Amino acid sequence: MKDWNLISEKEIIKGELFNVYNHQVKGRNGEIRSYTVVRRRPTVSVIPITPDNKIYIVGQERYLLEKFCWEVMAGFIEKGEDPLSAAKRELKEETGIEGRTWRKLGTLEMSATAIKGTSHLFIVKDLTQGAANPDEGEYITLKKIPLKKAVDMVLDGQFISAVSIAGIMIVDELIRKKKL
C-alpha cells in the first residue's frame, strides 16, 4: 500500500507554464491531509560538449532573481513533443548549436514536496554552430568554457540553477570515470 492515496484534486490556478492544485489525500493510518501542489510544464536541459571537454553555457538576466545567471541551456517541452525533440529544438533556437550524438543523462525533479517540475538532462556531441533564433524577450549570452572551469564556477556559487549544477557535476564525474 502507498503511504498516501489521492481522494480528490481541485485545480486552483491554470497557467501557461504551471498549474496549482489542492489535493486531499488519505494516509495509510486513515489520516486526511490537504496539500497544495504546483505542477510545472516539463523542461529539457542540454550540455553541448566539444572533443576537448569544453562546454557551452548560456547567461541571461533572470527577472525573478533580479540578476544575471549562468546556466546550462534549458527550455520547456511543448505539448505533444518528446524530450529529445524538445532538447534539439531548444538548443538550436537559443544557441544556434546542433549536434549529432545525443545521450540522455537522466531525469531530475525540482522538488520532492510541493513542486512537480521534471527536467530531462541531455549531453550532445559532434557540434555545429549556426545562427540562434531565441524567443522574443530572451537575451542570451553564449559562452564556451572548459568543463573544469564550469565545475569551479559551481563550487564558487556562480551557478544557482539546481539542474545546471547537477548536470555539470554529472558530466564531470562521467568523464572522470571514462563513462562518457
Image (cartoon, grey):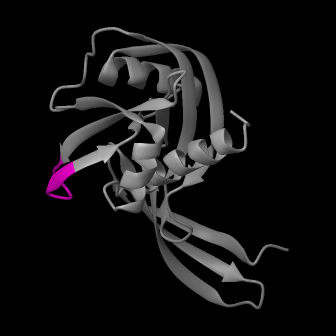
Asked whether 67 falls inside the magenta stretch, the response is yes
On the image, the x and y values in percent for residue 36 come to 45, 72
Depth check: give the residue in front, 150 or 61: 150
Q: State the residue at coordinates (58%, 51%).
A: 108
Q: State the residue at coordinates (56%, 40%).
A: 120
On the image, the x and y values in percent for residue 40 come to 43, 51
Quadrant placement of the C terminus: top right
Magenta extent: 62-68
On the image, the x and y values in percent for residue 139 come to 16, 32
Q: Give the total number of marks visible in the rendering.
A: 0
Q: Quadrant of residue 82?
A: top right
Depth check: give the residue in front, 35 or 56: 56
Residue 40: tell me if it is visible.
Answer: no
Asked whether 12 falls inside the magenta stretch, the response is no
Horizontal relation, residue 52 to residue 105: left or right: left
Residue 69 lies, with reference to residue 72, above or below; the image says below
Q: State the residue at coordinates (33%, 15%).
A: 96
Quadrant placement of the N terminus: bottom right
Depth check: give the residue in front, 70 or 26: 70
On the image, the x and y values in percent for residue 25 come to 62, 77
